[in-house]
Image (tube, rainbow, N blue to C red):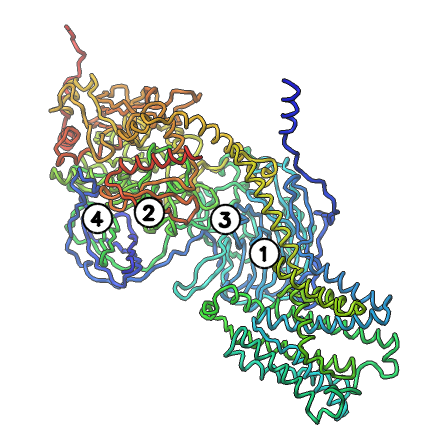
């Protein structure tokens, strides 16, 4: 029997009563699927826990649906809006651009083209299979081309142009590097002479027709999937344009030096540095010529990138936008699969808030497409905040396959699943912010509008060998369910959109195990909520760490720029740390003066994945203001030496109390876990001088701290300082000391009014 | 240090690598426009110039990437000029014969090489063309310029007839059949009355393009050779047009693949084969007409097995499947056959020896020798390197220029040193420690060994594969290449992760020890 592959995504991260969510399903090996709305209660299938638990929700969406394979048309590009066909070749023409190829040897790529591969028609300026700049034309049957004399060198800025006169067939190629000490991989010292001017007659006349003029790709057609993007270009394109006459060498030389193209004969003049506003720049590439032929990006070409004329003095596009005309295109970028909807569901009145999924099955094939149902208006007292930003950051992460150091980071041998091995053959759904694009650049956009294989309730991370993010967080959901707490669910996306109003009516907000990625608006809302009397149960590690942002109206695409410091899978290139969607400085919040300690009392201190450790009580846990948290726990009791994640409640990624980083001075250190191996190094952002002894067995910073403090108006924060805490909850049928402590806190935080122990505010009178 | 040691040191010293430039390069002027000229109506450039950066200096260089046109130009110029200017009678005759035979061979090669049809009737088609046109000039006063189109039509007609069985028969049987056709033609020409009462089945006294009065003068000979040279050029043009363009590409694609595969890809293999066969038959008819026009006669030798075998020898010696081979083979054999007539039968023995040597020692005839020589050199070089580098796994000075990233060269040295040290740490106790506790706190020695394993390159790196999570695990190795899935290393299944971890550890220890 053929293997059945089912997958899909939802068009909404979260919905509430009366709203409709659509599901795009793709199937291989099946033409029909059974669909069912389910509520997800637990995910982790580790034998020490309750296993996977779902609850079927009777709905009008349930039923059988016809499905087909849906394809992904990947590769970021931009298409020009040209209804009059001004860019069709009619007379003499010049195409010019500043380009920065990153994979010139990766096969044919189209930089600027009006070319249909399946028709062999049109024209294109690009890179040929031997890495040379080439201008080609096709008459519907045959092609002809003119190429530069020397190949393009990767990571080098060039001014390139091609001129062509259809009458005589005369064509020229013009190529010249624009190297300064900052803008490329190599400086002037490397004695390349990149200049090439070639003249040659072309024997084929290009055929016109209705085709898009495209940046960084060309059109292709296949019967099974229709039109799609091919000849995908990797690299940056800066200012470029099309001229209605063959420009002379002197004119091109002036343009290579940065002059504006001559006004006479401009058809299009794309000023890639135009359009920067206070809050960033969108997907439109502006034509500042007479015809307004703007180009519209697909799969979010990366902007706010340094251009050919970047002088290295300013690292922020807001200071010198004219030096930030670079637009980076990637052949594997995907921010919206654009599939046809298969199933839709309108959330009925009275539907319970929670973690939901559309379950699709066909024979042995099965998939859960997750989404969240938030309350239309708060009813309960407990809000579980799903870390959807962090889910996106890790979406389709494949670090084991790409990074030689992955096994050294995790400290063990990864455990691959069949789905992962399979997906690796064709990573068609795009990558995570932990991966690199095929040209080695870090991935800075991640989108909800694509199948996300690891955002599935049963998924286990290959690198970490346990659950991670969403499936792990379901252990917290399972805990709430098992103990019959009345909780409601909202997401990072909802908090970003609605702000503090989303939280105000809840007595307590429960976070996920690894809420690592935060937008400023969401972080402000949570901080204001806590400052003003809200209560936060932060059962996680390495939270509130990276800066993320999104464009208003397009919340499904998240931007992150990693750089300068922090435990990071990649590093933004010099000058490229500022977000294009929000104009913010990217990187870690700590470097923007907002370490996580200021909100939660703890902040990232170490990570390791070989084994987890238990906590032991610290003296503060015997103070009456906090002793109730450890009610029922023995004085020397070992806390959490069990769990579904590597056998302990403290580990994976952990955090520490640190007054210098903003832990409130009255915070109590209730418990600490230590005894980690050397696979738990101190985090990079704490290191000034690197020296021997920064690893777990010799570094006092390598530990997990449980911290408690109160805020104004009966507010409070309780932090566990460890990701693994969550997966110790289900052990022994949810009956264990980790579960007990969590219940103690949640019972107290869930009640309005003063907190237990809050009256013991006077100093000790110690007689002992 | 004793002097003996010093001598030994000296002897062990690495020979230096690097080579002076001996041949001049085309000057590369980056500041000037390069005019790429093309042949009229063609996409082929006159000079195939390629630019590159010299990897030693990053300096610009201009290379002729495709030298064959230059060689052709030189060869053909010499072939034209030398006999015409310096030619004796004998030389001019030999040159003309060479040009005619080479033209026949080129057409024949299209049939055998390009179309893949083992036809031995090519010479017979030429013969029929010659007889037909010669007879028509004698009996129907056909003017000589019309001989060529008539020859083409006759050749095409005969080609159609011979092509019919080719759809059904293949290989040896078809070869025998076509040999039979040639023999039938010979027997017929010998006996047919309408050919005339001429002696021994030959026609003579036909029309020709060299005026009768100067035919046997040097001028006549020169005109004859010039015409034969034009014929050769035309044959080369046809060969190139068929073999190098669409038809030839199609057929070569289908020879590489299975015929059925190419059919399924939409290549009409049989049709393309037939087209090539007919084109070459028409060409052979024209050559027959030329023969008749040149000699004003048609002789029975055109149907003879001896000439057929001589032509075959030319192709074998030159190398089947390349125009250069056909021409060079023809030149060699024609010279031996015609210039050394005085040697008598011995020269045929020599041709036989040449053929034997070509079959035994070359892979593509005389013209494949250059590639063969290069391969031999590459093989010898890699053998020598293998012998030298097996000592330390270090990179030799000869190898270094081929490694673009010099950090890789150091990485090899680093790995060698690391492995040497780590090997000394591996003991039974260490292995036992890992078995007891694959993921716990480890001794410094074990942790050091494991860290080296974890940091290894991706290609071939082991991972555990969960066949069934928490129940069945296997070991796989990563490809290290994007899109290439991991490979399963063996069929063993482990019930727990710890057992799989330990199995991976044992494999890595084994790899380390055997490295």
Cα distance between the residues tagged 2 and 1: 44 Å
Cα distance between the residues tagged 2 and 4: 23 Å
The x, y position of residue A298, in whole percent, is 43, 53
Q: Secondary structure at mark 4?
A: strand
Residue B195 disc label: none
**Residue drawn at x 73%, y 70% as measured from the top left:** B233
Residue mark closest to the camera, 4 vs 3? 3
Q: Residues within 10 Å of mark 4 (few under 14, many from 20)?
A: many
Q: Circle 4 sits on which residue?
A: A356
Q: Chain of mark 2?
A: A
Residue mark closest to the camera, 4 vs 1? 4
Q: Secondary structure at mark 1?
A: strand
Cα distance between the residues tagged 3 and 2: 25 Å
Q: Circle 1 sits on which residue?
A: A242
Confirm or deny contact between disc 4 and disc 3 (CB under 8 A). no
Q: Chain of mark 3?
A: A
Q: Secondary structure at mark 2?
A: helix
* Of residues A437 and A269, the one drawn nearer to the viewer in this rendering: A437
**Residue drawn at x 62%, y 66% as measured from the top left:** B244
Cα distance between the residues tagged 1 and 3: 21 Å
Of marks 3 and 2, which one's residue comes earlier in the chain?
3
Q: Circle 3 sits on which residue?
A: A234
* Of residues A620 and B372, the one drawn nearer to the viewer in this rendering: B372
Q: Circle 2 sits on which residue?
A: A420
Q: Relative to residue A117, is residue A296 depicted above or below?
A: above
The x, y position of residue B4, in whole percent, is 65, 22
């Amino acid at each position: 029997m053929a293997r059945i592959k089912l997958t899909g995504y939802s068009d909404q991260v979260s919905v509430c009563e009366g709203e409709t969510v659509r599901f795009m399903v793709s199937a291989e090996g099946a033409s029909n699927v059974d669909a069912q709305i389910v509520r997800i209660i637990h995910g982790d299938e580790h034998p020490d826990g309750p296993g996977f638990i779902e609850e079927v929700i009777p709905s009008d969406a349930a039923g059988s649906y016809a499905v087909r394979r849906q394809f992904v048309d990947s590769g970021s590009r931009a298409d020009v809006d040209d209804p009059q066909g001004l860019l069709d070749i009619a007379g003499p023409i010049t195409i010019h651009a500043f380009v920065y190829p990153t994979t010139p040897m990766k096969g044919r790529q189209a930089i600027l083209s009006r070319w249909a591969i399946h028709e062999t028609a049109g024209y294109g300026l690009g890179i040929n299979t031997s890495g040379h700049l080439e201008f080609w034309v096709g008459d519907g049957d045959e092609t002809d081309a003119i190429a530069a004399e020397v190949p393009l060198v990767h990571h080098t800025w060039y001014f390139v142009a091609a001129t062509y006169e259809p009458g005589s067939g005369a064509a020229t190629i013009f190529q010249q590097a624009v190297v300064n000490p900052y803008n490329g991989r190599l400086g002037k010292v490397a004695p390349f002479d990149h200049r090439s001017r070639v003249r040659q007659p072309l024997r084929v006349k290009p055929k016109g027709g209705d085709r898009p003029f495209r940046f960084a790709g060309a059109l292709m057609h296949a019967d099974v999937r229709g039109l799609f993007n091919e000849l995908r270009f990797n690299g940056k394109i800066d200012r470029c344009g099309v001229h209605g006459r063959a420009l002379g060498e002197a004119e091109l030389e002036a343009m290579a030096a940065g002059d504006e193209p001559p006004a006479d004969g401009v058809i299009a003049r794309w000023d890639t540095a135009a359009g920067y506003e206070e809050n960033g720049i969108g997907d439109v590439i502006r034509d500042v010529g007479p015809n307004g032929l703007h180009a519209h990006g697909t799969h979010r070409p990366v902007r706010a990138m340094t251009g050919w004329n970047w002088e290295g003095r300013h690292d922020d596009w807001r200071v010198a936008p004219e030096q930030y005309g670079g637009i980076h295109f990637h052949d594997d970028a995907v921010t919206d699969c654009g599939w046809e909807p298969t199933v839709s569901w309108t959330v009925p009145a009275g539907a319970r808030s929670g973690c939901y999924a559309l379950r699709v099955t066909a024979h042995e094939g099965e998939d859960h497409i997750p989404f969240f149902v938030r309350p239309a208006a708060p009813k309960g007292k407990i809000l579980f905040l799903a870390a959807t930003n962090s889910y996106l950051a890790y979406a389709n992460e494949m670090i084991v396959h790409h990074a030689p150091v992955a096994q050294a980071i995790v400290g063990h041998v990864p455990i691959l699943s069949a789905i992962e091995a399979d997906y690796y053959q064709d990573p068609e759904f795009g990558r995570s912010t932990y991966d690199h694009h095929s040209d080695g650049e870090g991935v800075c956009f991640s989108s909800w509008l694509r199948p996300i294989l690891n955002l599935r309730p049963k998924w286990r991370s290959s690198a970490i060998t346990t659950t991670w993010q969403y499936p792990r967080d379901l252990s917290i959901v399972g805990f709430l369910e098992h103990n019959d707490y009345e909780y409601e669910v909202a997401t990072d996306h909802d908090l970003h959109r609605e702000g503090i109003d989303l939280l105000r009516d809840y007595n307590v907000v429960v976070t996920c195990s690894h809420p690592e990625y935060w937008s400023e608006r969401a972080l402000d809302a949570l901080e204001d909520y806590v400052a003003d009397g809200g209560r936060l149960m932060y059962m996680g590690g390495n939270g509130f760490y990276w800066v993320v942002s999104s464009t208003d109206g397009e919340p499904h695409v998240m931007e992150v720029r990693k750089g300068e410091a922090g435990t990071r899978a990649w590093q933004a290139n010099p000058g490229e740390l500022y977000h294009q969607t929000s104009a913010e400085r990217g990187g870690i919040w700590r470097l923007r003066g907002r370490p996580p300690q200021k909100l939660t009392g703890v902040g990232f201190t170490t990570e390791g994945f070989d084994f987890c450790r238990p906590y032991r009580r610290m003296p503060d846990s015997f103070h009456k203001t906090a002793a109730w948290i450890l009610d029922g726990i023995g004085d020397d009791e070992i806390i959490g030496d069990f769990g579904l994640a590597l056998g302990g409640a403290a580990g994976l990624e952990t955090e520490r109390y640190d007054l210098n980083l903003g832990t409130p001075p009255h915070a109590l250190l209730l418990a600490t876990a230590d005894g980690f191996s050397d696979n738990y190094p101190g985090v990079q952002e704490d290191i000034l001088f690197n020296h021997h002894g920064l690893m777990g067995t010799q570094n006092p910073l390598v530990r997990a701290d449980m911290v408690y403090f109160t805020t104004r108006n009966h507010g409070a924060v309780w932090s566990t300082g460890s990701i693994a805490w969550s997966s110790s909850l289900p052990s022994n049928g949810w009956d264990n000391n980790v579960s007990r402590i969590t219940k103690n806190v949640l019972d107290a935080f869930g009640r309005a009014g003063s907190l237990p122990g809050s009256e013991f505010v006077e100093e000790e009178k110690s007689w002992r | 240090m004793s002097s003996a040691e010093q001598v030994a040191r000296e002897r062990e010293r690495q020979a230096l690598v690097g080579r002076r430039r001996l041949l001049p390069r085309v000057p590369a002027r980056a500041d000037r426009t390069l005019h790429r000229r093309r042949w009229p109506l063609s996409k082929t450039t006159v000079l195939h110039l390629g630019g590159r950066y010299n990897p030693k200096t990053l300096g610009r260089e201009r290379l002729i990437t495709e030298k064959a046109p230059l060689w052709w130009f030189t060869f053909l110029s010499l072939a034209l000029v030398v006999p015409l200017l310096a030619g004796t009678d004998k030389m001019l005759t030999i040159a003309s014969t060479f040009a005619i035979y080479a033209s026949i061979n080129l057409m024949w090669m299209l049939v055998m090489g390009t179309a893949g049809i083992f036809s031995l009737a090519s010479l017979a088609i030429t013969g029929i063309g010659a007889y037909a046109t010669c007879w028509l000039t004698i009996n129907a006063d056909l003017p000589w310029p019309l001989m060529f189109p008539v020859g083409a039509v006759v050749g095409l007609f005969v080609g159609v007839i011979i092509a019919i069985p080719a759809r059904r028969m293949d290989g040896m049987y078809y070869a025998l059949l076509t040999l039979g056709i040639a023999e039938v033609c010979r027997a017929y020409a010998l006996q047919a009355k309408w050919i005339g009462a001429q002696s021994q089945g030959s026609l003579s006294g036909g029309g020709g393009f060299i005026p009768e009065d100067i035919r046997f003068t040097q001028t006549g000979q020169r005109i004859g050779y010039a015409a034969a040279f034009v014929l050769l050029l035309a044959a080369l043009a046809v060969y190139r047009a068929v073999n190098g363009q669409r038809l030839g590409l199609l057929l070569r694609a289908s020879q590489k693949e299975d015929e059925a595969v190419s059919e399924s890809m939409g290549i009409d293999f049989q049709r393309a084969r037939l087209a090539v066969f007919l084109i070459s038959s028409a060409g052979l008819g024209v050559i027959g007409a030329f023969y008749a026009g040149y000699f004003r006669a048609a002789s029975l030798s055109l149907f003879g097995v001896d000439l057929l075998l001589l032509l075959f020898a030319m192709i074998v010696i030159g190398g089947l499947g390349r125009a250069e081979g056909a021409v060079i083979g023809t030149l060699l054999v024609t010279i031996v056959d015609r210039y050394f007539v005085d040697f008598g039968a011995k020269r045929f023995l020599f041709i036989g020896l040449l053929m034997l040597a070509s079959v035994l020692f070359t892979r593509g005839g005389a013209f494949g020798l250059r590639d063969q020589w290069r391969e031999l050199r590459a093989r010898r070089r890699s053998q020598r390197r293998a012998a030298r580098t097996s000592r330390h796994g270090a990179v030799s000075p000869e190898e270094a220029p081929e490694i673009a990233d010099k950090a890789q060269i150091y990485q090899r040295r680093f790995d060698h040193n690391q492995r040497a040290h780590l090997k000394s740490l591996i003991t039974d106790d260490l292995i036992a420690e890992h078995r007891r506790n694959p993921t716990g706190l480890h001794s410094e020695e074990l942790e050091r060994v494991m860290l080296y394993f974890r940091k290894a390159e991706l290609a071939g790196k082991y991972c555990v594969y969960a066949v069934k999570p928490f129940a069945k695990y296997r070991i796989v190795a990563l490809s290290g290449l994007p899109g290439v899935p991991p490979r399963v290393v063996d069929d063993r299944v482990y019930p727990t992760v710890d057992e799989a971890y330990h199995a991976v550890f044992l494999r890595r220890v084994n790899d380390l020890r055997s490295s």
